Amino acid sequence: MEFEDRYLQVQRPKYDCLLFDLDDTLYPLCSGLATSCRNNIEDYMVEKLGLEKSKIAQLGNLLYKNYGTTMAGLRAIGYDFDYDEYHSFVHGRLPYDNLKPDPVLRHLLLSLPYRRIIFTNADRVHAAESLRRLGLEDCFEGIICFEILNPTHKSAPSDDEDDIEFVRLDHNSADHNNYPTTTTGTSAIFDIIGHFAQPNPVSALPKTPIVCKPSESAIERALKIAKVNPQRTLFFDDSVRNIQAGKRVGLYTVLVGTSQRIKGADYALESIHNIREALPELWNVENKSEVGYSGKVAVEITSVTA
C-alpha cells in the first residue's frame, strides 16, 4: 500500500490549473488592439477628464509605471469617474475585426487536461468579445476580470468574500452599448509629475482603490477566487511585471511574446502557439481529453466562495 501511494504521488500531474492573461497573450501584439487602446485612453484623459494634451504622454507613463494601469493611477491621484464609462470609451472603439478565429490555438487549449481560466485587468465585455472573435469562448472555465476584483458599486476593494463572483461567458454580454455613463467629476488632484520632478520626493504616492495586476494582492485574490494552489498553477502573461509578481506569489510562470527568459519566468514563448514545443510535459498525463466549458460565449455569473 505504501508503494502504491508513492507511485500515485509520483504520477500526479504537476499542475491543476492554467491561468491565462488575455490581451497580447492569446493574440499577438501586432493585432493593433494595444496601440488603439492606448490612444483611446489618452483621448479619454483629454475629452472626459480635461487634461492637457501636452502632459498626457508623461502622465500616462508615470501612472502605468507606478500603478499597473493608467486607470488605477488616475483613480489614485484623485480623478473620479464611472468605471463602466471608462471601459466603454477605451474598449468600445477597438478594432475587434483584427481578431480572427484561431483554430490552432483552440485545438491546443482544448487538448490540455487542466482547468483553464482567464485572468485579465480588462472588463468582462472586452474579455468576452475578444474570446468570441478568437473562437475560444468555450475553451475556458471562466474569467477573472476587472469587475470581479473591483465591485463597481463600491469606491474601494471589498474584503467581504460574499461579494466574490466568478464570470462565465454568455453571448449577450459583449454589447458595449449597455454601459451606463455618468458625468466625470474630480476632487483634489495629486501632482504626480511634480512629485517625480523633485530630486528627492518626500511625500508618499497615494494609493489606488483599484485592484489589478501586477499587484501581488490582486494575484492572490484571483487565486483565492478560482480556488487554486499557486504552487500547482501555471501562469501565462506577456507582461514582465505580471510574471515577476506571479513568481513572488508562488506561481509557475510563462512569459509570452519573447523567447528570451527573464528573471521570474520559468518558461518563455515567442507565441502562445509554441506552447506544445516548449512545454510538452503538459500533455504527458493520463486520461487526456478535449473538454469545452460551454457551447456559447456567456456572461453568466456564478458565485464562488473561497
Image (spheres, grey):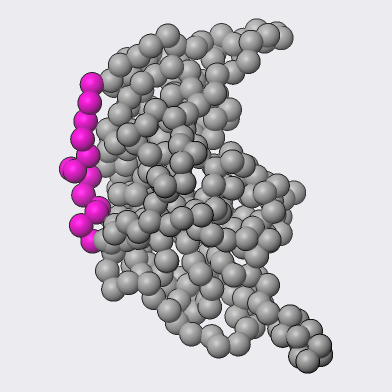
Residue sitting farthest toward the right: 3
Residue 5 among those drawn in magenta = no
Residue at the image position 59 percent from the left and 11 percent from the top = 195
Residue 209 in the image: above or below residue 257 = above
Residue 177 among those drawn in magenta = yes
Residue at the image position 37 percent from the left and 31 percent from the top = 154
Residue 1 in the image: above or below residue 262 = below
Residue 19 in the image: x percent, y percent?
54, 60
Residue at the image position 51 percent from the left and 54 percent from the top = 306
Tell me which corner region of the image, top left, top right, bottom left or bottom right, holds residue 198.
top right
User: How many numbered callouts?
Assistant: 0
Residue 10 in the image: above or below residue 301 = below
Residue 138 in the image: x percent, y percent?
36, 70
Q: Look at the image and tell me whether residue 193 can be seen.
A: yes
Tell me which corner region of the image, top left, top right, bottom left or bottom right, holds residue 287.
bottom right
Q: Look at the image and tell me whether residue 24 can be seen.
A: no
Left or right: residue 65 versus residue 264 is left
Residue 259 in the image: x percent, y percent?
66, 59
Q: What quarter of the picture does the N terminus occupy?
A: bottom right
Residue sitting farthest toward the left: 177
Look at the image and give the residue range highlighted in magenta: 171-183
The residue lying toward the viewer, choosing from 96 and 296, is 296
Left or right: residue 170 versus residue 140 is left
Residue 232 in the image: x percent, y percent?
65, 65
Residue at the image position 63 percent from the left and 15 percent from the top = 204
The residue lying toward the viewer, choosing from 21 and 183, is 183
The residue lying toward the viewer, choosing from 258 and 119, is 119
